[in-house]
Image (tube, grey):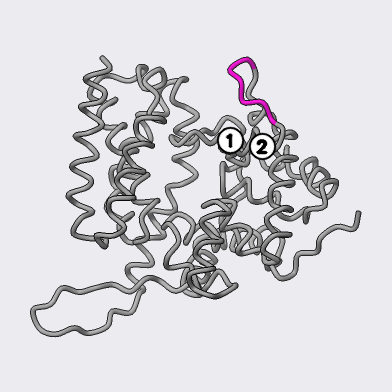
Amino acid sequence: MGGVKTFLIMLFVASFSCAMHAQQKADQSDDLMESVQQWAEENLDDSVLNALKQVDQDRVRAFFTQLQGQFEGTNVYHLVALKETASQVLPVLQQFEETEPLAAWLQTHLDYLETAEELQRRVTVTPVKPGASLILPSPTPQLERSVWNKTLEKRPLPPFAKNYVPQLKQVFVAEGTPAELVWVAEVESSFNPKARSPAGAAGLFQLMPSAARSLGLSTSWLGDERLQPEKSARAAAKHLRHLHSHFGDWRLALAAYNAGQARVDNLLKKSKSRSFDAIAHRLPAETQMYVPKVEATLHRREGLTLADLKVPKS
């Protein structure tokens, strides 16, 4: 079985690599493919996928490998091609208890694919020479913020939000983090504590195992504390407070929450800037969309912008 698994992963990654080769710069491609291959080997859990028929296992594995690769790439528009497959994979995952956590994560992330399609429709294309291929410029952060605000302007509360928001706001305040940032959990998991990403993040605030452990949470199979709402919220609040203290800016803090502090630091250094907008087009596609989605969610739920947030006094 291990040999078959390795072969399938290599086949999917090879196919994905061929498609990406024509779309990504050569100096980025090798690092991206190595990252996707490593992610596939470490995170596509056969113990979960075994609940599915073999044909569904293969399709789900291929889909999540491609989705991770496109989220890690920098071209937002490449997500559009996965929209139809995502809508087919979701009901398959929802059929089985073992794959419900993956389904909860995918349900929350479907609107990235839908919003990417809307951005593709609205972006202004610069005319090119006759016979040349059209190249869509990266959507500006301003356009993304506008589209996300439109997408979320009538979205109802997630089913679990009323149960968790009042309690978790108190946790955030106790940790010295603006209470309103509890809505990060809507973007991460739609307030479903069982949600688990194919990359291994889990819980309301989708903490990765290494980040969770560094924040004092146990990720043991005996009891993964990321799945406990209050403990997950406390860890997320601490992490966001640290990132804001480091960057002095909530957009950069949120970008680092999603993509990693080191990556954001490196891009800021290379661009010789201190703003999210200056580096957005070089961040992973997921992060490019994540930050304005958090902003739009905060505006929808609290009527606030990130600039309006006040750090609680200790």
Q: What secondary structure is marked by label 2?
A: helix
User: From the viewer's perspective, is residue 267 above or below residue 45?
Assistant: below
Read off the residue under disc 1. Answer: 210
- Image quadrant holding the N terminus, namely top left
Contact between labelled residues 1 and 2, with CB atoms less than 8 Å apart: yes
Q: Which residue is mark 2?
A: 214
Foreground residue among 97 and 175: 175
Looking at the rendering, the stretch of residues picked out in magenta corresponds to: 217-222
Q: Residue at x 63, y 50 (%)?
A: 184
- The x, y position of residue 224, in whole percent, is 63, 24
Report the amino acid beneath label 2: Ser
Residue type for callout 1: Ser
Which residue is found at the position 51% from the left and 61% from the top?
A: 266
Q: From the viewer's perspective, is 124 left or right of 259? A: left
Inter-mark Cα distance, 2 to 1: 6 Å
Residue 314 picture location, percent across and down: 91, 54
Q: Quadrant of residue 310?
A: bottom right
